[in-house]
Amino acid sequence: MRQLKSYLGGQWVSGEAPMSTITSAVTGEAIAETSTRGLDLGAALAHARDVGGPTLRAMSFVERGELLKRLGKIIHANRDELIALSAENSGNTRGDAKFDVDGASGTLAYYGSLGKRLGEGTFLLDGPSEPIGRAPRFVGQHVFVPRRGVAVHINAFNFPAWGMGEKMAVSLLAGVPVLEKPATATAVVTARVVELWDEAGIPAGVISLLAGSAGDLLDHLGAQDVVAFTGSGDTGRIIKSHPRVLALNIPVNIEADSLNAAVLGPDVEVGSDTFQMFLNDVIRDMTQKAGQKCTAIRRVLVPESSVDAVWEEMVERLQTHAMGDISERSTTVSPLSTASQQRDILGGIAELEAAADASWTHPQPCPEPGFWVAPRLFRTDKGIDAPFVHEHEVFGPVSTVVTYSGSADDAVAIVAKGGGGLVSSIYSDDRTWGAEVLLGLAPWHGRLQWGSKKVYDQGVGPGTVLPGFVHGGPGKAGGGEELGGVRGLRFYWQRTAIQGDRALLEKILGKVEA
Ligand code: NAP
């Protein structure tokens, strides 16, 4: 069986027994094992801080960007191998695996280009300088400088390649070395990517990998380190309240649960282009990666007047999707990644069943073996008062149609009942209604998408995270923010106001104009 190793202190190392077993989502059989027990994680962090940090900080943005481009190209060159591993470990169809693997190389390439644009410097000025006294010589200038620690990245099971790539791209461009900790259950792809990078040669200490449980990692954090976490709200709270994090005020970015919504406007006619866009987005999000996307649409708000037509169309489309052999093109819904996800989702489905006014189950029996769950659609006419629907994210091929009056106020109130989300989308060609709903929803979200007739065939859907736009959301979604082009780098930087003689400041900072 494959033994996963961690890449710490520039060495591939294994922990002591007992090992954690990693299973195939398709066969349920063990395919790999790993352990982090007994590994010296304090020394690993110190190596990244002391060796990787100075190397990266000495590199210009252009050079860091070139490194990112190289990392992305290595993933791309080994795409087929990674897609096959993703199928073996996570049970992804080829399309779902590509979404993860290409997402990783694409995000690294995007931040690589951003490095070129940021130029030959190693840090950035933040806005213009401002005079302090009466003499124009004495000024203050804000600067962003890379923190002198390690960025600890703890990721969820659903995107073993992209999850690492999107966090790492931002951190390395900012000038901060990374320690990547993927979810143990799907760490096979992540570990192989780091192995490929190591084989091709990466600067010492810049990238570390912990392939398995976090162990006592957080006990060794230093005051200049940061933690970026993606996963469940419960784990997010444990990390945020870790004594070391609290004592040293270590910045923690959290991407957690989200009850993303799609809202159909009352003006949209069944069968129109805007309607088709709405349907495409909702069905894609229910089926792609078997609904195991943090951005997937969980609640579908539909005006009472068109709910029967919407339900019929959704069922018709969902019936064209099939589970089965993941290597076949005809299979469009993959199994869930782990047995524990399957258990959780079946529990969530039982709760939705009890709360719903109607439900539909994909008629195909689930294949065996493997962690399959058939697509499920629920409907509630209880709007904002519907139990469970606005509280709990069921992380699978599952969505609930929520009927509403069609008023902008009702739409905003119902979506906001989710307590804060990563992304929601609205579909309407009515500018007044659209503006009211969008601006009402904005404080509750990190990202919004407006679907309408002029762009009906343009989008990749709200469920696709794009590196140039922020990913994260307030409240239940964790209160975090990642990506967003240069905005994402700020998490890894300290903003410092430097006051002094303009001429002297210009010597160390470059042009400073009061
Ligand atoms: P999870 O159980 O919270 O695990 C996430 C990560 O945290 C894993 O790497 C896990 O490691 C690690 N972890 C667990 N306990 C820890 C601790 N005490 N200290 C440090 N690290 C710890 O979540 P998951 O099962 O992977 O993902 C499930 C949920 O994540 C989904 O239901 C979804 O809501 C959410 N999610 C959100 C986003 C987003 O971008 N907002 C994306 C994907 C998923 P081990 O695997 O070794 O236990």
Image (cartoon, helix red, strand yellow):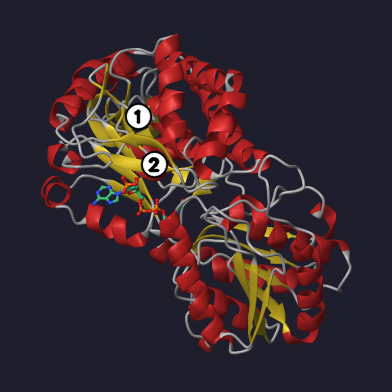
Q: Quadrant of the C terminus?
A: top left
Q: Position of residue 170 (x, y in %)?
A: 43, 32
Task: Inspect the image, locate mark 2, and give the three-letter code of the amino acid beneath it.
Answer: Ile
Residue drawn 28% across the image and 25% down it: 137
Q: Disc 1 versus disc 2: distance between alpha carbons?
A: 10 Å
Closer to the camera in the image, 300 or 55: 300
Q: Position of residue 55 (x, y in %)?
A: 30, 13
Whether residue 513 is situated above or below residue 230 in the rendered picture: above
- Does residue 433 appear left or right of residue 105 in this picture? right
To which quarter of the image does residue 99 belong? top right
To which quarter of the image does residue 435 belong? bottom right
User: Circle 1 — which element?
Assistant: loop
Closer to the camera in the image, 401 or 53: 401
Q: Position of residue 134 (x, y in %)?
A: 26, 35
Task: Find out whether the residues at labels 1 and 2 contact each other: C-beta distance under 8 Å.
Answer: yes
Q: Quadrant of the N terminus?
A: top left
Task: Inspect the image, locate mark 1, and give the three-letter code of the amino acid beneath it.
Answer: Leu
Closer to the camera in the image, 196 or 139: 196
Q: Is residue 134 visible?
A: no
Q: Which mark is residue 140?
A: none
* Disc 2 target residue: 22
- Does residue 174 appear left or right of residue 160 in this picture? left
Whether residue 372 is situated above or below residue 416 in the rendered picture: above
- Does residue 369 appear left or right of residue 436 in this picture? left
* Disc 1 target residue: 4
The answer to which of marks 1 and 2 sits earlier in the sequence is 1
